[in-house]
Each structure stands twice: as C-alpha cells, then as structure tokens.
Image (cartoon, helix red, strand yellow):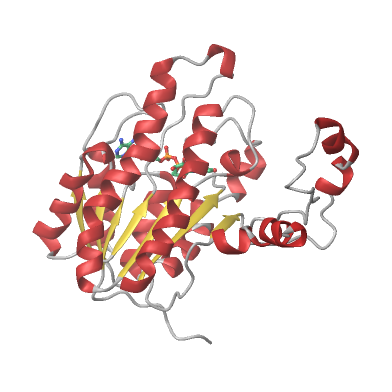
Amino acid sequence: MSESVRLEDKVVIITGAGGGLGRSHALLFAKHGAKVLVNDLGGSAQGEGASASAADRVVAQIREAGGIAEANHDSVTDGAKIVQNALDVFGRVDVVVNNAGILRDKTFHKMEDADWDLVYQVHVEGAYKVTRAAWPHLRDQGYGRVIFTASTSGIYGNFGQSNYGMAKLGLYGLTRTLAIEGRKNNILVNAIAPTGGTRMTEGLIPPQVFEQLKPELVSPLVVYLGSEQCEETAGLFEVGGGWIGKVRWERSLGAGFDPRQGFSPEEVAAHWQQICDFEGAAHPQDNIEALKEMMQNLQKYAL
Ligand SMILES: NC(=O)c1ccc[n+]([C@@H]2O[C@H](COP(=O)([O-])OP(=O)(O)OC[C@H]3O[C@@H](n4cnc5c(N)ncnc54)[C@H](O)[C@@H]3O)[C@@H](O)[C@H]2O)c1
C-alpha cells in the first residue's frame, strides 16, 4: 500500500464545484482532509443565470460529513475575488482545480460570436484569472498544485464543438508552459480530459453508459494530482469509467530537404509517406527536444 494521500494543511479551490465532476472532487478533497473553497456560479449548462444554492449544498454536505468547506459564488471570470475569498477564510491557497465549464455547441457555420466568446471566457479566461491570482501565493510559499480540465473534444476534435475544443486544448497549452515556469517553485501543473455522467453529458451518452460513468471515478486522479505525493507535472490524463491513461505528443521523424537549395511542393508530395510515417516516431518532451530533427537536418547540409 502506498503512503496515504492526506491534505490536512492544504487549502483547495475548486471552480464549478456545485455539481457534476467538481462536486465530486470537492467531496473527495474534503474527505482527505483538505479545506475546500467550493466555487460555483450556479448557472445553466449553457452559462445562463446564477444561483448560490449549488455551492451551498455541496458545502453543507461536506460539513455534515465532518469536513471543512466554504462556499463562493463568483464567476471564474472574477478569479481574483475567488482567490481572495480563500485567503480571507482559510489564510492560504495550495491547490487550484480549474473545473468550471459550460457548453455552447454549434457547428462552425452556425457559430455566433456570443457562443465563441462565452465558451472562451468561462474555460480559458476563467481558468487564467483564477490561476493568475493564485500564482504569486503559490510561488511565495514554494508549493502549489494546479489542475486544468481539458477534454477529448480538444485533443481529438468533436463535431459541433469548435469553440469548446479550442478552449479545452488551449488549457493544455497553458498547462505545458505553467509546468515549466512553476517547476522551480515546486508548483506542479497537470491537465485532465475527463469523461463523466453529468448534466453536461446527459442525453449525449447512452443512458446505460451514462450511469456507469460516475463523477466519483474521475476525482481520485484529481486528488492525487493535487497532493504532495504527486511529482508529475505537464501531464495530460484521460480519465473516466474507472480507467486512467496518459496522453503524449508523438511526431514522425519526418523528411529532410537541403535547406540551401529549398524544395518544391512536388518534393513535399513525393515525400508525403515519409513525412507521415510514425515508424520509430519521436516523443518530444519540450521545445528543445522538438527541434532535434530539424537541427540534425541543418547540420547534415552545413558547409
Ligand atoms: N462530463 C464530461 O464528460 C466532461 C468531458 C470533458 C470535459 N469536461 C469538463 O469537466 C468540467 C466539469 O463539467 P461537468 O461535466 O461536471 O459539468 P457540470 O455542468 O455538471 O459542471 C460545471 C459546473 O461549472 C459551473 N460554472 C459554469 N460557469 C461558471 C462560472 N463562470 N463560474 C463558476 N462556475 C461556473 C456550473 O454551474 C457547474 O456547476 C468542465 O470544465 C467540462 O468542460 C467534462
């Protein structure tokens, strides 16, 4: 048995924790001893309206079970207020779980600016605002764990979700850079791409599968990533239905051309199979590793 995951002295902010996956994360973090700021605006799945009751209900449930939690009803787009609230009631912040989300699904030819903007604002700007406000505190204390909620719709694409896919994979881009910038201050940053039966996926997933995709099957990964035991950073994990897997970039070794001569579109066409051949592919971990094959090509033709 591994050492138990305890978070007694840790303060965790979970956005969008009034229902669905966030609620499940909040309950599990509290069960493991964390003090939890349960944030939720309490609007509809499309981002309309607001209500305090969602967050309040989760806080009541945590307290009934003997846990410690406070409610916050701000929008993630007011991230500084959420972080200030955690500092006011708990005196610190250690873990940020960026989970709040909405859907405004439309095929791209029907996409309106309002749908594009609102999805961007909640997922990307909201996660930015909350994390940006927490960041100096995490740096100063030399400790932090940040989790972003991406989606397979961003990783692989999904019909009718151009706005959502853009936002969700954008969060993984943010994860990669914050992991690099946070490392020296012991701030570890990871992303999850969950699948869970929530109001967001109700009607989209067949009912019998929906029942099995319990949000509780996502939260153990999130609590682990939010714990001191976790040493992972810059990771992306697909999780759901009792299964967890790690995602990484893969790039073909590619085709090289003489950079002194340049090359034609016809030569690109002639080498297409080689460009797309994943035999022996590279798995670059960072920008430097990603440049390896290009630099080798330059060296090959250097005078
Ligand atoms: N359920 C899935 O299968 C699935 C798949 C991929 C990604 N996700 C992501 O997981 C996260 C949780 O989704 P869920 O399935 O639990 O859906 P959900 O609708 O049950 O939960 C989202 C919560 O975020 C809150 N919220 C929305 N806008 C907010 C704002 N501006 N400020 C604060 N809170 C706000 C909502 O009130 C809601 O309680 C989302 O980011 C979603 O995109 C879910």
Above or below, 142 relative to 161: below
Residue shown at the point (43%, 50%) measured from the top left: 174
Residue 293, horizontal then vertical, whole percent:
71, 59
Residue 200, horizontal then vertical, whole percent:
49, 35
204 vs 93, nearest the viewer: 93
301 vs 34, nearest the viewer: 301
The answer, for residue 186, to whether it is visible in the render is: no
Residue shown at the point (49%, 52%) measured from the top left: 215
Residue shown at the point (73%, 47%) measured from the top left: 259
Quadrant of the rendered image containing residue 44: top left
- Left or right of residue 263: residue 44: left
Quadrant of the rendered image containing residue 265: top right
Quarter of the image where the C terminus is located: bottom right
Residue 154, horizontal then vertical, whole percent:
57, 40
Above or below, 59 relative to 299: above
The answer, for residue 9, to whether it is visible in the render is: yes
193 vs 117, nearest the viewer: 117
Residue shown at the point (33%, 48%) measured from the top left: 17
- Left or right of residue 135: residue 193: right
Which residue sits furthest left?
88
